[in-house]
Amino acid sequence: MSAVAAPEVFDPNAAEHRSDPYPVLHRMREQAPVHRLVHAPSGRAYWYLTRYADVQRALHDPALGRQLDRLPEHLAALHRRWESDPLAMVRRNVFNLDPPDHTRLRRLIAPAFGARTVAAIEHRIEQVVDDLVTGLADDGTVDVIERLALPLPVLVVAELVGFGIDDHARLRRWSDDMLRSRDPVQVRRAGTEFIGYVQEQLAFRWAHPGDDLLTRLLSARQAGELSHHELISSVFQLLLAGDETTVNLIGNAVLELLRHPDQLARLRARPELIDSAIEEVMRFNGPVGHARPLYALADVTIGGTVIPQGDTVIPVLLAANRDPAVFTDPDVFDIGRSPNRHLGFGHGIHFCLGAALARLQARAAVGTLLRRLPHLELAADPEQLPWTPELFLHGVRHLPVRTVRR
């Protein structure tokens, strides 16, 4: 009598999947679309969702939330014991809140990222990109991440918020330490320094109001529309939390175009496809692996599986965006794909506030790079490129390229 094979234990966070998580995500979607993964040290249960319909449902289901204080105290206490968050001091922002607090803060912040505001700074973004790209062709092999993708979002958002342009080096360092470091001491130190800097900027803006988001948030604080803690946390969210996403989007876009020369040639021949190309990058190999974790506020049934109250739900965006039930030929990179209903920017009330700004920066960066460096190629084996160490943020860490002389 033959032995029955044990079911596969899926862990999309495992190091061997970082550069290409899609094979394991496809197997999960087919064999265990609502998959319970237990974190060994804590015994904490995570439920990974990999079907488009389940991910979309989870992102707008009011039975799933982000605020621990909405859980019964004994369940919330377990999460607090399991979680050691060195940046807890800057977490009270729209990313981590549910209505009504989420609604109140999003209403205050949203105008800074609306279509009118973003359109008004489009020319400035193009100037910044042009300055960053200038000289790349003469520098031999260059790292697109270091020279273009990393500096761009900090420079742009710093101006939008109202920070001095000369402070971008410090802001860049704090962003790297807080969002990329795995050392909790380094993360906490960077967070403390950043908060001190924000306090200084708020004091300056109180004495010298400007036409910027920092001044508007300070006015809202004085009017009692948000707390001081929420003000600091919102600035953190605006300046840093969207930074890594844009970095990854630009890097992944350049990588995929260079890995797909037919699509690169297509884009060069039809530059008007740049917007569609950016959307396809968001679907095909997006900058965020999964949405922020959600807590089951009550027992909830997803995909025919009951998820107990208090457990953590992980909607995997990368998996949803290659679901063959929604996308024809999901593993094909097609810059002209239409329709393209990807979930790369999230869904529902937590749809990315900075989506329009991220799209604009990626369009400017990728479009200018391809226009100014017409004979670009990878300067490293794509299989050996380093990637972010965890599934949540999904991007190549270094991307060496060179211009081929013809």
Image (cartoon, rainbow, N blue to C red):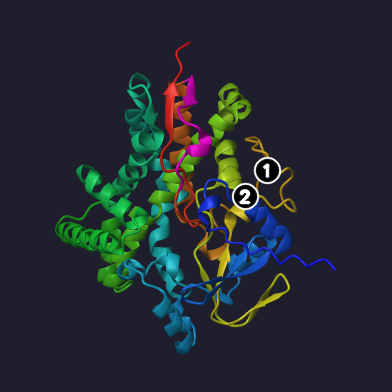
What amino acid type is highlighted by mark number 1? Asp
Q: Residue at x 15, y 57 (%)?
A: 204
Residue furthest to the top in view is 406
- Within 10 angstroms of label 2, few (less than 14), some, or many (20 or more) residues? some
Q: Secondary structure at mark 2?
A: helix
Residue furthest to the front in view is 1
Pick the front one: 255 or 41:
41
Q: Is residue 385 visible?
A: yes
Mark 1 to mark 2: distance in Å? Answer: 9 Å
Q: Which quadrant, please, contains the N terminus?
A: bottom right
Q: Which mark identifies residue 22?
A: 2
Q: How many marks?
A: 2
Residue for badge 1: 331
**Seen in the image, is 240 located left or right of residue 354?**
left
Residue 139 position within the rendered picture, expressed as x and y whole percent measured from the top left = 33, 22
Decide whether residue 376 is among the magenta residues.
Answer: yes
Residue 346 position within the rendered picture, expressed as x and y whole percent measured from the top left = 55, 57
Residue 150 position within the rendered picture, expressed as x and y whole percent measured from the top left = 36, 42
Q: Residue at x 60, y 46 (%)?
A: 283
Q: Which range is magenta?
A: 374-387
Q: Earlier in the sequence, mark 1 or mark 2?
A: 2
Residue furthest to the right in view is 1
- Comparing labels 1 and 2, the label whose residue is closer to the camera: 2
Q: Quadrant of residue 94?
A: bottom left
Residue 280 position within the rendered picture, expressed as x and y whole percent measured from the top left = 60, 41
**Seen in the image, is 329 located left or right of residue 148?**
right
Q: Residue at x 34, y 63 (%)?
A: 234
What amino acid type is highlighted by mark number 2? Tyr
Q: Are marks 1 and 2 in contact (CB under 8 Å)?
A: yes
Pick the front one: 3 or 133:
3
